[in-house]
Image (cartoon, rainbow, N blue to C red):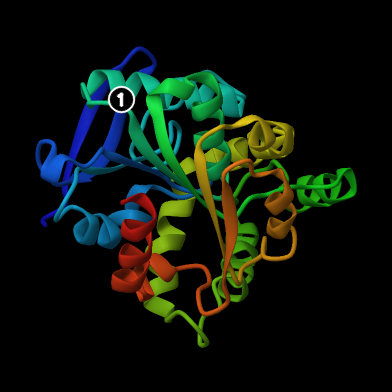
Amino acid sequence: MPVRRSYVDLPFGQMHLRHAGKGAAAGRPPLLCLHMSPASGLVYERFLDAMGHDRVAIAPDTPGFGQSDPLPEFPEIADYARTMWSLVDALALPGPVDLMGYHTGSLTIAEMARQAPDRARRLILVSAPIYTEEERAALRALYRPGPIFTADGAQLLELWRWFLVFFRVGQDNTLEDAARIFYERLSGRERHWWGHRAAFNYDLAPVLSALPHRVTVLNPDDDLAANTPRAAPLLRDGRVLDLPAFTHGFLDTHTAEAARLVRELLD
């Protein structure tokens, strides 16, 4: 199903999104997919193509990333969640909707379900970042504020070299795969750290433990693989599903397999 791109006017500005599928395909709820930060809805593009055959599937760019306008400075996860509900309203999506999130996006869909439990149906979280306070401090130091673009290009080069390791180039992903996603990670420019700031301020544990929804946490072999299992005892109706064959980029490298899995979980 061809993936289309469009803009939607919202109270904060314009939101850019990718979407596939038409109408209430096969009677299935729409699927809203939220990316990690910093990145964009591009990480879901091939996945949308696969999912759009039997439902409407949508992947917006989080405000301030990709081609979406930013929110006022220093938004929290709750602000991102409210903005995504305003997108659902603007698109007049029939509810309740299914929600899928990836890292920061996982936090946002959990908060969306907390804010409007009757409007969310099933949730799929790619990783569930349950942090200790020590881990939060270390992550704030790693994903620190500061310019990416400097006259000598040193910070940009350091970030690229880090990403090659993070994205497992030469093992699970190619250099071309990395470049495609890295470019989108730069889209936040001076706001590149806003999503991380919001994520490290958000406590997912009490939210997950209160959600009555069917929640499936996918645990690929990535940088959150060790702390994601901490979500298992918090889930009232769900499970953590270990996926050691997947890592960052799996929505591109294992598109058909990922779509098959998500379709089974939602249907």
What is the quadrant of the N terminus in the image? bottom left
Q: Is residue 14 above or below residue 141?
A: above
Q: Could you tell me which residue is drawn at 48 percent across and 51 percent down?
A: 186
Q: Could you tell me which residue is drawn at 31 percent across and 63 percent down?
A: 259
Residue at far top of view: 11
Q: Is residue 261 above or below residue 177?
A: above
Residue at far bottom of view: 170
In the picture, measured across the screen, residue 227 lies left or right of residue 109, that is right
When asked about the image quadrant of residue 207, the answer is top right
Give residue 19's position: percent from left, percent from top.
21, 44
In the picture, measured across the screen, residue 20 lies left or right of residue 143, that is left
Give residue 130's position: percent from left, percent from top.
73, 47
Q: Is residue 71 above or below residue 48?
A: above
Q: Could you tell me which residue is drawn at 54 percent across and 44 percent down?
A: 106
- Name the residue nearer the viewer: 155 or 194: 194
Give residue 220's position: percent from left, percent from top.
56, 68
Label 1 secondary element: helix
Mark 1 neighbour class, 10 Å CA radius: few under 14, some 14 to 19, many 20 or more: some
Name the residue beneath numbered marker 1.
88
Residue type at mark 1 is: Val
Q: Is residue 181 above or below residue 71?
A: below
Q: Could you tell me which residue is drawn at 43 percent across and 70 percent down?
A: 250
Give residue 163's position: percent from left, percent from top.
58, 68
Residue at far front of view: 237
Residue at far right of view: 134
In the picture, measured across the screen, residue 21 lies left or right of residue 162, that is left
- Name the residue nearer the viewer: 85 or 215: 215
Number of residue marks: 1
